[in-house]
């Protein structure tokens, strides 16, 4: 089981790494060509696309939980029925999301961006088809095909960016994104071992939405939490400030790719294990503890790389984004903490604790919005916004660990220990960054990168050997 999990995680991480890498390159290319103000408009498109992912209204959330449980119990026909309903409802709602997203970009950018707005709508629909197919395959524990489609997406998107952005700017970026998604969907659907479910409007069922609503709302509030600082910065500080802050969000997205890949692998395995145990939360205790601890170690290594990378990117490639350096450590520290919430969120919804997890996330979101708005109005600017975001992340992690202890997923002392360990690992990353701050740029990147590689290899060997530390 552990070897299967490790294989799935490595494949998922590889595919996610390809997507994260091309996403970072995409924003560097666009930022370099367009400048901060136009990059702020690009971030409007990015926020619209990210929020559109959640337009499935719980259908894909239900699939993620119910699909593995049904397949683990041998109810293959029921699992396929859930797949058909989830894909059909997702695409139906994607049409509405496409209209809203295209209208928002057209309203903000005016007539010069009408073509880009139309392509944004097309991209939203293709993106939802991509995520629906990804959810189906992952619920079947088929990770290799998903990784191949992500790699195809990265190659096509990068080639399109380099070709189209210098001459067509935002329109070229959206055309490249849409074309890459189309290729990725084809890769997933052509010659699949088990036929992929076709979208059928008659298969849409309200019951699927009801069953997946708590899981969906947990995911949705987390997405809103991730995007709230960008919305507030854009509304209160303007497009140029959002362009500077947008560079931070791309570094944060790169840091979150590993937890996202881990969660995508964790959910189907946890669902099967939970179902086989007779739905006993304690059966996932070792999985929960090991997941948080492993992510704390790997994400701390990634944090050190991201801190060094931020300095190198700004000082050597994008000097006009220098205002982004002031808040970068607050921001990336908060992202590190958010990374550790991924396994807790997935495991809590698996054991039916979606409602208390939702309450914790709503409280963290309220704190984030309030403090981020106060930072903008009070004049502390981007550093204040980033610090507020980091504080909300700490409250979220603490709250989710507390819910896990209350619901029997973790012992209370284990939750406290994991929280303390995370603080130690984060402090180590910041100490390493400070110690190498005066080094030449290549050494500044090489030291944390080597440490990250060693940590990854050590944890892989421990997992293969059956270790839990």
Image (cartoon, rainbow, N blue to C red):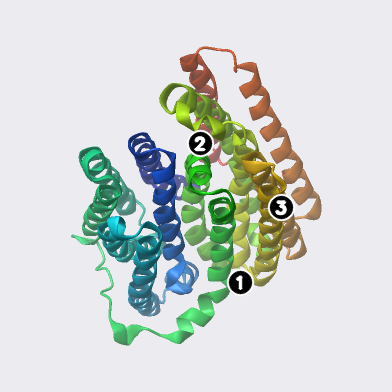
Is 305 left, or right, of 431 in this rendering?
A: left
Label 3: how many residues lie within 10 Å, few (<14), some (14-19) or many (20+)? some
Image location of residue 355, percent across then percent down = 66, 72
Image location of residue 308, percent across then percent down = 54, 25
Instruction: Name the residue nearer the viewer: 1 or 14.
Output: 14
Is 122 left, or right, of 75 in this rendering?
A: left
Q: From what the image shows, is residue 280 above or below residue 453?
A: below
Marked residue nearer the N-terminal end (2 or 3) = 3
Q: Which residue is mark 1?
A: 278
Q: From what the image shows, is residue 292 above or below residue 268?
A: above
Instruction: Name the residue nearer the viewer: 166 or 192.
Output: 166
User: In the rendered structure, are the residues bearing label 2 and label 1 in contact, judged by CB atoms less than 8 Å apart?
Assistant: no
Q: Nearer the viewer, mark 2 or mark 3?
A: 3
Q: Quadrant of the C terminus?
A: top right
Q: Which residue is mark 2?
A: 460
Q: Nearer the viewer, mark 2 or mark 1?
A: 2
Residue 339 appears in view: yes
Q: Which residue is mark 3?
A: 374
CA gap, disc 1 to disc 3? Answer: 48 Å
Image location of residue 437, percent across then percent down = 60, 18
Q: Residue at x 37, y 75 (%)?
A: 96
Q: From what the image shows, is residue 331 above or below residue 275?
A: above
Image location of residue 313, percent across then percent down = 46, 27
């Amino acid at each position: 089981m552990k070897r299967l999990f490790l294989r799935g995680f490595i494949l998922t991480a590889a595919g996610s790494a390809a997507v994260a890498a091309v996403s970072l390159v995409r924003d560097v290319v666009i930022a370099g060509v367009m400048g901060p103000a136009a990059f702020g408009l690009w971030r409007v498109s990015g926020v619209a696309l990210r929020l559109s992912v959640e337009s499935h209204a719980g259908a894909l959330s239900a699939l993620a939980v119910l699909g593995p449980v049904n397949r683990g119990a041998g109810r293959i026909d029921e699992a396929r029925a859930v797949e058909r309903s989830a894909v059909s409802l997702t695409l139906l709602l994607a049409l509405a999301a496409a209209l809203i997203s295209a209208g928002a970009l057209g309203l903000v950018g005016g007539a010069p961006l009408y073509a880009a707005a139309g392509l944004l709508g097309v991209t939203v629909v293709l993106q939802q088809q991509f995520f629906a197919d990804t959810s189906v395959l992952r619920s079947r524990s088929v990770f290799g095909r998903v990784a191949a489609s992500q790699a195809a997406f990265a190659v096509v998107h990068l080639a399109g960016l380099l070709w189209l952005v210098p001459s067509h700017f935002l329109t070229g970026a959206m055309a490249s994104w849409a074309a890459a998604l189309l290729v990725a969907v084809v890769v997933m659907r052509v010659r699949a071992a088990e036929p992929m479910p076709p979208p059928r409007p008659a298969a849409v069922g309200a019951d699927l939405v009801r069953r997946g609503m708590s899981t969906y709302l947990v995911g949705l509030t987390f997405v809103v939490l991730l995007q709230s600082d960008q919305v507030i910065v854009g509304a209160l500080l303007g497009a140029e400030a959002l362009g500077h802050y947008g560079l931070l969000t791309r570094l944060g997205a790169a840091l979150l790719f590993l937890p996202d890949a881990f969660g995508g692998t964790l959910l189907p395995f946890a669902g099967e294990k939970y179902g086989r145990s007779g739905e006993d939360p304690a059966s996932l205790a070792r999985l929960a503890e090991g997941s948080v601890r492993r992510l704390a170690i790997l994400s701390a290594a990634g944090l050190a790389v991201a801190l060094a990378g931020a300095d190198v990117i700004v000082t050597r490639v994008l000097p006009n984004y220098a205002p982004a350096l002031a808040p970068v450590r607050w921001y990336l520290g908060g992202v590190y903490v958010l990374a550790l919430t991924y396994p807790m969120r997935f495991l809590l919804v698996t054991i039916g604790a979606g409602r208390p997890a939702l309450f914790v996330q709503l409280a963290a979101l309220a704190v984030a919005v309030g403090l981020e708005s106060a930072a903008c109005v009070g004049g502390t600017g981007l550093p204040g916004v980033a610090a507020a975001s980091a504080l909300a992340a700490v409250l979220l992690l603490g709250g989710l660990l507390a819910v896990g202890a209350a619901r029997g997923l973790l012992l209370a002392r284990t939750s406290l220990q994991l929280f303390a360990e995370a603080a130690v690992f984060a402090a180590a990353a910041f100490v390493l960054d400070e110690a190498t701050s005066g080094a030449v740029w290549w050494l500044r990147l090489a030291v944390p990168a080597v440490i990250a590689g060693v940590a990854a290899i050590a944890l892989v060997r421990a997992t293969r050997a059956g270790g839990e530390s």
